[in-house]
Amino acid sequence: MIYIVTDSTAYLTKKEAEELNVKIAPVGYYISGNSFGESYADCNGDFKKDIQQGGDSNKTFHTNNSVFAGIFSELITSGNEVLCFTLSSRLSGTYSSACIAAKEVGEDKIKVIDSLSTAGGMYFLIKKARQLINSGKNLNQTADEIEKMRENIGTVFSVDDINPLRKSGRMGIVKRSVNTMLNQKPVFILLEGSVVNLLVSRGSVEQIMHLKDSIPADADEVAVHFACDSFLVEKFVSALKEYCKKAKIIKRILGPVLTIHLGNGILGASWIKYDKIPI
């Protein structure tokens, strides 16, 4: 059997992970000096309150290669093969950890893929990989198709407060003048796995409009990411339903790791266009 392994920033629920035969490698984080391992999307507790209380002491750390090695070893010893996805290598050292672990355990039975994405983008990759595996594709064939699929996935997001993102060091081409004063809400995209500033919105109405307009109208599926006010999420979903007529739109709450980097006001989406994927 081919098992899928991913880090926790794919934000699968426990049920999804079980249905897709996915093992989760937790990404770590500190709040108020205490360390935690991120879990399934529906098993992280009231992390937003904890993050607010932790303030500037909050930080994250990538998954250690020993964690991946333990998961890989267990699966390989049981006669399985492994397809592993991690969040973008330009955002975290988790991909490097997985590659090191694969070399230690046995690269011939393990494929590690840099998703060049995170959250909903990784979810789309995982779901498609399971479909390919179930259809009879072997490990190498599945990995090849998934690497092609990355080109048809995009991510856009906006934050209320840019300071957590600045502090994280994950921003790429971002003007130093970008701020969140006077109700400004900067909008970013992931470009080849890096965070790039797209534009600045003024107010929530313009924010939703710019987020929506950054998504292809003919997208097949859209995953709305959030760790913010539910009213704003619903407004965004409603706008997407009018704009992306054929798309399946799902809501996927983010966990503590990305919320620490992006703030509790994060709102965004990942999308995919399946009809452009060569099979």
Image (cartoon, grey):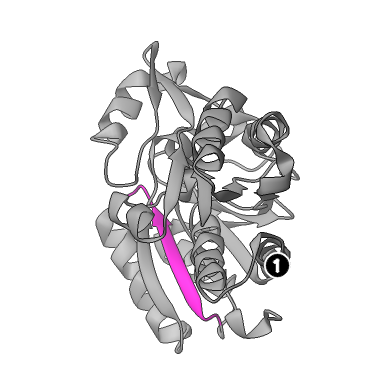
Q: Residue at x 64, y 43 (%)?
A: 178
Q: Secondary structure at mark 1?
A: helix
Q: Position of residue 278 (x, y in %)?
A: 71, 81
Relative vertical location of residue 104 with respect to residue 142 in this rendering, above or below: above
Q: Residue at x 52, y 52 (%)?
A: 4
Looking at the rendering, the stretch of residues picked out in magenta corresponds to: 219-228
Q: Is residue 163 visible?
A: no
Q: Residue at x 58, y 60 (%)?
A: 155
Q: Position of residue 257 (x, y in %)?
A: 45, 35
Q: Which quadrant of the rendered structure holds the C terminus?
A: bottom right
Q: Is residue 169 magenta?
A: no
The residue closer to the viewer here, 105 or 225, is 105
Residue at numbered disc 1? 141
- Quarter occupied by residue 192: bottom right
Q: Position of residue 169 (x, y in %)?
A: 65, 30
| Amino acid type, label 1 | Gln
Relative vertical location of residue 109 with respect to residue 155 in this rendering, above or below: above
277 displayed left or right of 231: right
Q: Position of residue 203 (x, y in %)?
A: 44, 57
Outermost residue toward the bottom? Answer: 245
